[in-house]
Amino acid sequence: MAENSKKQAVPELVWLALGELAVCGIIVAVYLIIGKFSWKVVTGALLGAAVGLVNQALLTVMAGKAFDKAAKERGTDEMTEEEIQAFKSRHERNVKSMITLSFIIRMVLLVGTLLLIFLLPAVFEPIPAVIALAAVSVLIILFGLLKKKK
């Protein structure tokens, strides 16, 4: 990934990780308040948060590499319309392939995690795991809205 992409992705992932830790804390607090707390709540929430973060990091890295590779090959030379179309056609397939591969890997990771959660109920509480896993998407939306307000 290009240096500029890394500079942008790392802080976003750090903020996302902090948000996930806050979500895990809220989950644990709720389970303590309702009297249903066990260590399975903590392990479930942490697993969901970790997989959500890995999922987002994989997307960022794999998509970033595909775009960076195309940008590097593009260079700074002027191109004719024909060259632009050929370049676009060639790299559009590569970028789509990388994003599709990323999607497949991330879906296998998510499905595997869900199977693990439900196959090992003595280790992971499913509801906190799923909440923490889903919280990544909500946090990304919230951080995006906060960025727009700045």
Image (cartoon, grey):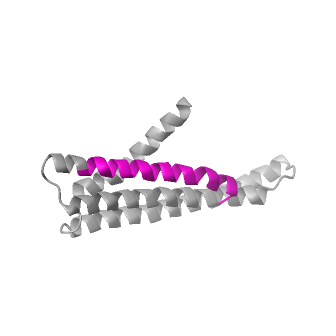
What residue is at 12 percent from the left and 50 percent from the top?
35
Q: Give whichever of 36, 58 is nearer the camera.
A: 36
Q: Residue at x 68, y 58 (%)?
A: 2
The dominant secondary structure in magenta is helix
Left or right: residue 46 compared with residue 9: left
Q: Can I make out residue 90 in this image?
A: no
Viewed as shown, does residue 108 lie left or right of 92? Answer: left
- Give the residues in magenta: 1-28
Question: In front: 88, or 41?
Answer: 41
Q: Position of residue 146 (x, y in %)?
A: 50, 35
The C terminus lies in which quarter of the figure? top right
Residue 8 is covered by the magenta coloring: yes
Judging depth in this view, the residue of 91 and 57 nearest the camera is 57
Residue 18 in the magenta stretch? The answer is yes
Left or right: where 55 falls relative to 113: right
Q: Is residue 16 visible?
A: yes
Q: Residue 27: x percent and y percent?
A: 26, 49
Q: Residue at x 48, y 59 (%)?
A: 103
**Front in this rendered view, residue 61 or 99:** 61
